[in-house]
Image (spheres, rainbow, N blue to C red):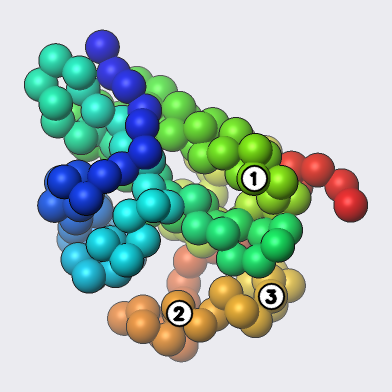
Amino acid sequence: MVMIRKATIRDVGAIHRLLKKHADLGELLPRALSDLYDDVRDFSVLEDKDSGAIIGVCALHVCWEDLAELRSLAVSEEYQGKGIGTALVTAALAEAEGLGIKRVFTLTYGPDFFTKHGFEIVDKATLPQKIWAECIKCVKFPDCDEIAMLKLLREG
């Protein structure tokens, strides 16, 4: 039995460990522990109700009045291929719609996964300059090799 819920402060350590495992494998960018505390409200976790373990995580970060970023999507290795990533993305997109967000983007190394969820590859230069403020902190700045993808939730 699993449950998606909003992250709490007590989840930050588990989120950090899960993201670090995937960052060490080169699957996503590392996140500093202090940044996770700053952004804890952005995160949803998928918790195994039997063990209490955090087995998946995803963040929805609001960037502007009509734009949010889906980021830090990670699933524990032993639970991959079981629909957990899909459940987390679906929950994040529903949250974005509930907030009135029109567009959600992601920067990823796994475009095939996001294409299945209606995201399309876009040129990074088409994204607003405001989003690049966090990129300055990235270890790969200015040589970003992630693929930018965008999903339109509603017109207007």
Q: Identify the residue position indicated by label 1 in the image.
A: 99
Question: x, y percentage for residue 75?
Answer: 29, 38
Residue 151 seen in the current view: no
Query: Mark 2 packing: few (<14 Cα in 10 Å), some, or many (20+)?
Result: few
Q: Earlier in the sequence, mark 3 or mark 1?
A: 1
Q: Identify the residue position indicated by label 3 in the image.
A: 128
User: CA–CA distance between discs 3 and 2?
Assistant: 13 Å
Q: Identify the residue position indicated by label 2 in the image.
A: 135
Residue 46 appears in which quarter of the rendering?
top left
Q: Closest to the observer: 122 or 100?
A: 100
Residue 124 appears in which quarter of the rendering?
bottom right
Q: Secondary structure at mark 3?
A: loop
Viewer-side label of 2, 1: 1
Question: x, y percentage for residue 132?
Answer: 54, 80
Q: Closest to the observer: 25 or 29?
A: 29
Residue 7 located left or right of residue 134: left
Instruction: For the residues labelled 3 and 2, say whether their Cβ atoms are less than 8 Å apart.
Output: no
Q: Residue furthest top?
A: 1
Q: Residue at x 31, y 43 (%)?
A: 7
Amino acid of disc 3 = Pro
Q: Secondary structure at mark 1?
A: helix
